[in-house]
Amino acid sequence: MEFIDIGIVAIMVAMVIATYRILTGPSAADRGAASDVVFFGFVGLVAMLGFRIDTELVVDIVLVCALVGFLAALSLARLITGGKR
């Protein structure tokens, strides 16, 4: 269980740093990348906590969140580039 706790703390630190980047980022691309880090950090926290309390329901939640997050990242990239391919 110690490794899971260390992983949870590491993800939380990364989310705090990414939140700072969202607030102070010089460009929209920096803010977008940092928001992806925060979102997927949250998904990672859900996965770690689900593994820690030993439940199988978390796998479905993490899978759906990861798919939604991937589509959101694509949409944000398209928005930042102005719709150019």
Image (cartoon, helix red, strand yellow):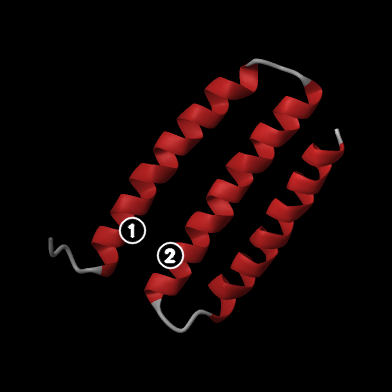
Residue closest to the far bottom: 26
**Whether residue 44 is situated above or below residue 39 in the rendered picture:** above
Q: Are marks 1 and 2 in contact (CB under 8 Å)?
A: yes
Question: Which mark is first along the chain, 2 or 1?
Answer: 2
Residue closest to the far left: 85
Quarter of the image for the N terminus: give it.
Answer: top right
Give neighbour class at mark 2: few <14, some 14-19, many 20+ (Cα, 10 Å).
some
Q: Give the alpha-carbon distance from disc 1 to disc 2, as whole Å.
A: 7 Å
Depth order, front residue of 82/52? 52
Residue closest to the far right: 2
Give neighbour class at mark 1: few <14, some 14-19, many 20+ (Cα, 10 Å).
some
Query: In screen coordinates, is 27 left or right of 15?
Result: left
Residue 33 position, x and y percent, is 45, 64
Quadrant of the rendered image containing residue 54:
top right
Q: Amino acid at mark 2?
A: Gly
Of the numbered discs in the image, which one, if any, rests on residue 32? 2
**Whether residue 35 is situated above or below residue 46 in the rendered picture:** below
Q: Residue at x 28, y 68 (%)?
A: 80
Quadrant of the rendered image containing residue 53:
top right
Residue 40 position, x and y percent, is 54, 47
Q: Residue at x 63, y 17 (%)?
A: 57
Query: In screen coordinates, is 31 left or right of 61?
Result: left
Q: Amino acid at mark 1?
A: Leu
